Amino acid sequence: MDEIFDLVIIGSGPAGVSTALTARHRGKSALIVSTAPEDSPLCRAEHVDNYPGFHNATGRELVDAFVKHAEASGVKFARGRALAVADMGGVFGVSVGADFVQGRSVVLACGLNRAKPFPGESEFLGRGVSYCATCDGMLYRGKPVAVIGQSADAPEEAEYLRGIGCIVEYFDSQRAKKYEIKGEERVTTLTADGADYAVDCVFVLRSGLSPDSLLPGLETIGAHISVDAEMATNLPGVFAAGDCIGGPYQVAKAAGDGNVAGLSACKYVENLSKQTGGKQ
Ligand SMILES: Cc1cc2nc3c(=O)[nH]c(=O)nc-3n(C[C@H](O)[C@H](O)[C@H](O)COP(=O)(O)OP(=O)(O)OC[C@H]3O[C@@H](n4cnc5c(N)ncnc54)[C@H](O)[C@@H]3O)c2cc1C
């Protein structure tokens, strides 16, 4: 995608969609980068009866309505996992699987990341631990790999790896609960519930990453991103909204945060344009 968007928003839950709608109403372009809509925890809610206008809706109905509204308002979507955000001096680059998108500002609306890395995961990242089948799969053709599938697209990604010739051991939440990734220079073994599997790579496919691993230097307090009242983080041009900044973990609060973050990001982009005489 060559276009530089005014806002790149990570997450298509209520906070991300509300941010994007606010941006569109202020005449700004907005791209939402997100894994499948069903990865939003909201899809697991059987009934949501505290969000105005949606009496007795299921979480899935709300998510579908939000995404439909965004699409109708001209919000663009890039489906995939955001793996890294880099400040390139006035423009942010975001890696989405093997693709790359650009924005003048970034809004993190990635929900609460409850997952702790598995033992060995951070240590071997880039040396036999990967978060992206498309990016790294080709390196392991003909080799044994494990996929720990914790996102909606994980079975499809495992099929992709099989299709290009990887020998795949697939682990869903039924097959094992406890993992450890081991090796020396590189990964050699995945231990799953006490059983050892000799593998050259472990693909850990979660719906999200911890925000500070996405964006080095981002200030967090525990599991939450630190923001001020304008939803600005410590990094200029980077804003955050929704469950990822703290509770109450509710749809109405996430949507409200998204509104504030959207307005702040629009203001930031307008100031940037004034400073550069509209050349950004
Ligand atoms: C079972 C259950 C029932 C609930 N019931 C209610 C209720 O009745 N009422 C209520 O108000 N709230 C309820 N909630 C809470 C509500 O779901 C959340 O507060 C709300 O969804 C938070 O919105 P959000 O936009 O901040 O994040 P989320 O909805 O979590 O959306 C974040 C999205 O970003 C994606 N993402 C994260 N990282 C990345 C990345 N690196 N790259 C790409 N995509 C990424 C995630 O996959 C997800 O789709 C419930 C939650 C659960 C789990």
Image (cartoon, grey):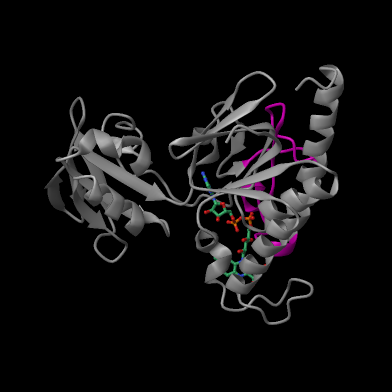
Whether residue 114 sits left or right of residue 68 in the image: it is left
How far from the left and from the top, in percent, is residue 265? 77, 37
- Magenta residues, start to end: 225-252
Q: Is residue 78 above or below residue 185?
A: below
Q: Is residue 90 above or below residue 212?
A: above
Q: Is residue 232 above or below residue 260?
A: above
Q: Is residue 226 visible?
A: yes
How far from the left and from the top, in percent, is residue 268? 80, 31
Q: Ligand 1 is in which quadrant of the figure? A: bottom right
> Which residue occupies the foreground of this view, 183 or 74?
74
Residue pictured at 85% horizontal, 18% vertical: 277
- Res 123 quadrant in image: top left
> Which residue occupies the foreground of this view, 242 or 276?
276
Question: Which image quadrant: the C terminus?
Answer: top right
Residue pictured at 54% horizontal, 27% vertical: 216
Whether residue 4 sits left or right of residue 80 in the image: it is right
Whether residue 138 sits left or right of residue 40 in the image: it is left
Question: Does the segment drawn in magenta span residue 16?
Answer: no
Question: Does the segment drawn in magenta span residue 230?
Answer: yes
How far from the left and from the top, in percent, is residue 176? 25, 60
Specify the principal SS of the magenta part.
loop
Furthest-bottom residue in this view: 56
Residue pictured at 72% horizontal, 30% vertical: 237
Whether residue 260 sits left or right of residue 223 in the image: it is right
Question: Which image quadrant: the N terminus?
Answer: top right
Q: Is residue 150 visible?
A: no
Count of numbered circles on the image: 0
How far from the left and from the top, in percent, is residue 76? 65, 48
